[in-house]
């Protein structure tokens, strides 16, 4: 089999939806089932797990989202801080501030599979959409380390600038840019991932800290800790388009999967500010635990998880009501900056352990979906995309498959939740896909 990575754009066959169902009605059905299917994710085979980095303990608490309890505790490095889950849910990357390392957790058995030396004082961390790279902000060396996930080694160190103190970090949905908040300089650096160089610098507020990006990549939201506000960056022009006042001592920030809301943890006020991205205003303020830090939204957007450093707990917020539904006890001084919720696909169809390593990106997708598949030997493979009510909306069959990557056209299907099933000879693998 040819080991060179190849790309192929393939026009897939369309199986039209039932014409008797009007588009408006179909969208209502899809929206309803989007919420229903994900609400019972454990039943249909999507196991959601939250990984909470406990800064004082040097551990990670693994929370079973369906039961709301800690299922296991993993020992990592000294003073873990940032967390980033790979898009396929197979790996979790943790920054260890005092060790100057990144711990790699294998989610299949919740053990540390590798420890990677990076720069001094690693804090923020983010995985690229295709899972091939991990970006780490090093506050002590004013650099960003680029990790090759295939070899678990640093392939590049990008200089951000003297006294910049890089903190938060996020990758654009297409993987072409990395945005870094510079706590020491009141700026955001934009990195071109093709050249691993800083291509732009954007003035924001005083002491920028947490950072996130909208699902469509059009806006970056940056917490300005010194000004108690959030800067909204237009990524097309690299300019600040709005500033939004939030609570006292803002730190962490997260965006909902549909991009309609942004959540900010206010450590001094012990609250979370809920921002409407349509109006760029705070629509609700939620009281949580002591000194809230990192926060992450569940893949279906129904829950918000907030790590409370002072209370050794995680507050779980119902985003429909903006009320704390429960509090989960974890380790000492939980921080967990970044995306710390993993959705591991166990499948709603039959599945076994035949060798097939599949990754899909971007996810959520807009106009197309890249599918990377590694097989030990060529065989016949089918790619089926189902909507939430089980109808086939895309299908593709390839004889003697030996390509490494294909692109599936999604322009003709409506927004919603889908399931991709890839089948070979005696095996089947499944992925949850969100089309924006």
Image (cartoon, rainbow, N blue to C red):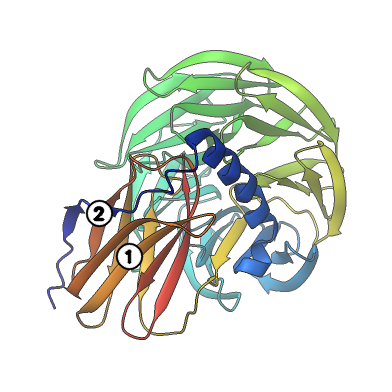
Q: Is residue 366 found left or right of 14 in the rendered image?
A: right
Residue 263 pos. (x, y %): 68, 34
Q: Nearer the viewer, residue 372 or 59?
A: 372
Residue positioned 45% across, 68% down in the render: 430
Residue 265 pos. (x, y %): 74, 35
Q: Is residue 220 found left or right of 400 in the rendered image?
A: right
Q: Which mark is residue 383?
A: 1
Residue positioned 68% across, 25% down in the render: 275
Q: Is residue 141 above or below residue 38?
A: above
Task: Report the quarter where the N terminus lies.
Answer: bottom left
Q: Is residue 247 visible?
A: no
Q: Residue furthest left?
A: 2
| Label 1 – label 2 distance at C-alpha | 9 Å
Q: Label 2, secondary structure: give it.
A: loop
Q: Nearer the viewer, residue 168 or 72?
A: 72
Residue 359 pos. (x, y %): 38, 62
Q: Quadrant of residue 190?
A: top left
Q: Is residue 355 found left or right of 39 in the rendered image?
A: left
Residue 88 pos. (x, y %): 47, 61
Q: Is residue 94 above or below residue 136?
A: below
Q: Which mark is residue 12?
A: 2
Does label 1 or label 2 sit earlier along the sequence? 2
Q: Are marks 1 and 2 in contact (CB under 8 Å)?
A: yes
Residue positioned 51% across, 61% down in the render: 102
């Amino acid at each position: 089999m040819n080991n060179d990575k190849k790309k192929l754009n393939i026009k897939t066959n369309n199986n039209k939806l039932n014409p008797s169902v009007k588009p408006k009605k179909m969208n209502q059905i899809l929206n309803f089932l989007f919420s229903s299917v994900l609400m019972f994710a454990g039943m249909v085979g999507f196991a959601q797990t939250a990984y909470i980095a406990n800064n004082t303990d040097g551990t990670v608490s693994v929370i079973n989202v369906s039961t709301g309890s800690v299922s296991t505790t993993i020992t990592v490095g000294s003073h873990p801080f940032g967390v980033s889950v790979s898009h396929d849910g197979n790996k979790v990357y943790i920054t260890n501030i005092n060790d100057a390392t990144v711990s790699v957790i294998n989610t299949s058995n919740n053990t540390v599979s590798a420890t990677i030396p990076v720069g001094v004082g690693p804090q923020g961390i983010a995985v690229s959409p295709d899972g091939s790279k991990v970006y780490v902000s090093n506050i002590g060396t004013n650099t960003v380390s680029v990790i090759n996930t295939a070899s678990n080694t640093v392939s590049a160190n990008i200089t951000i600038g003297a006294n910049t103190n890089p903190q938060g970090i996020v990758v654009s949905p297409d993987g072409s840019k990395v945005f870094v908040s510079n706590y020491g300089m009141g700026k955001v650096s934009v990195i071109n991932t093709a050249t691993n160089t800083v291509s732009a610098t954007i003035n924001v507020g005083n002491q920028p800290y947490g950072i996130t990006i909208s699902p469509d990549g059009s806006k970056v939201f940056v917490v300005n800790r010194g000004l108690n506000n959030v800067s909204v960056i237009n990524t097309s022009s690299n300019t600040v388009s709005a500033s939004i006042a939030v609570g006292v001592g803002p730190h962490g920030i997260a965006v909902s999967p549909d991009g309609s809301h942004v959540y900010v943890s206010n450590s001094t006020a012990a609250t979370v500010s809920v921002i409407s991205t349509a109006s760029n205003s705070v629509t609700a303020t939620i009281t949580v635990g002591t000194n809230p830090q990192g926060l992450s939204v569940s893949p279906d957007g129904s829950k918000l998880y907030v790590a409370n450093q002072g209370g050794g707990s995680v507050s779980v917020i119902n985003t429909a009501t903006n009320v704390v539904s429960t509090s989960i006890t974890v380790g000492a001084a939980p921080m967990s900056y970044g995306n710390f919720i993993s959705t591991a696909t166990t499948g709603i169809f039959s599945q076994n352990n035949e060798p097939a390593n599949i990754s899909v990106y971007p996810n959520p997708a807009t106009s197309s979906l890249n599918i990377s598949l590694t097989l030990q030997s060529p065989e016949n493979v089918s790619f089926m995309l189902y909507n939430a009510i089980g109808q086939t909306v895309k299908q593709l069959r390839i004889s003697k498959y030996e390509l490494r990557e294909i692109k599936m056209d999604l322009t003709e299907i409506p927004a919603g939740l889908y399931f991709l099933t890839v089948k070979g000879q005696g095996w089947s693998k499944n992925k949850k896909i969100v089309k924006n």
